[in-house]
Image (spheres, helix red, strand yellow):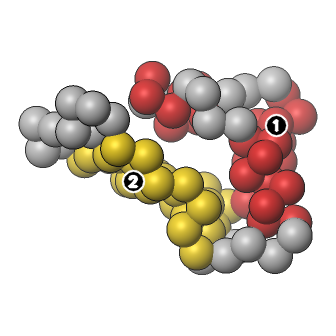
Amino acid sequence: MMLRIVATSAGGDTARISLPLAIIEVAIDSGLNMAQVSGNEALKNIDLNRIMDMVRQGAIGNLVEVESADGDTVQIFVE
């Protein structure tokens, strides 16, 4: 299974990240946060532990969708 992150800025820049869930487990064990994994500061408040808890409970598809007041968007989903 893959965790996918798509971050789009209001200016039109897009970052796409695909990570195997096993790498996310290692990141959690190492104390990394989502901003460190993705390089996007907008994701610093995303809790990797909660995302992995959702996945362990069978969540697939869109897990998080965020749109900031200035038009930046972030989608996190599992495929």
Q: Please determine whether, in this image, residue 5 is positioned above or below residue 67.
A: below
Q: Position of residue 19 (x, y in %)?
A: 60, 56
Q: Viewed as shown, does residue 30 lie left or right of 20?
A: right
Q: Is residue 64 above or below residue 49?
A: below
Check disc 2 and report the residue beneath it: 6
Mark 2 is on which residue type?
Val
Left or right, 67 with respect to 78, comes to left
Structural crowding at the residue carrying mark 2, measured as other residues with C-alpha within 10 Å and reported as few (<14), some (14–19) or many (≥20)? some
Q: Quadrant of residue 67?
A: top left
- Measured along the vertical axis of the image, is residue 74 above or below residue 54? above
Q: Which quadrant holds the N terminus? A: bottom right
Residue 15, percent from left and from top: 32, 46
Q: Amino acid at mark 1?
A: Ile
| Picture coordinates of residue 78, whole percent (x, y) | 61, 69
Instruction: Report if residue 9 is visible in the image.
Output: no
Q: Residue at x 81, y 25 (%)?
A: 31
User: In this rendering, is residue 1 above or below 53?
Assistant: below
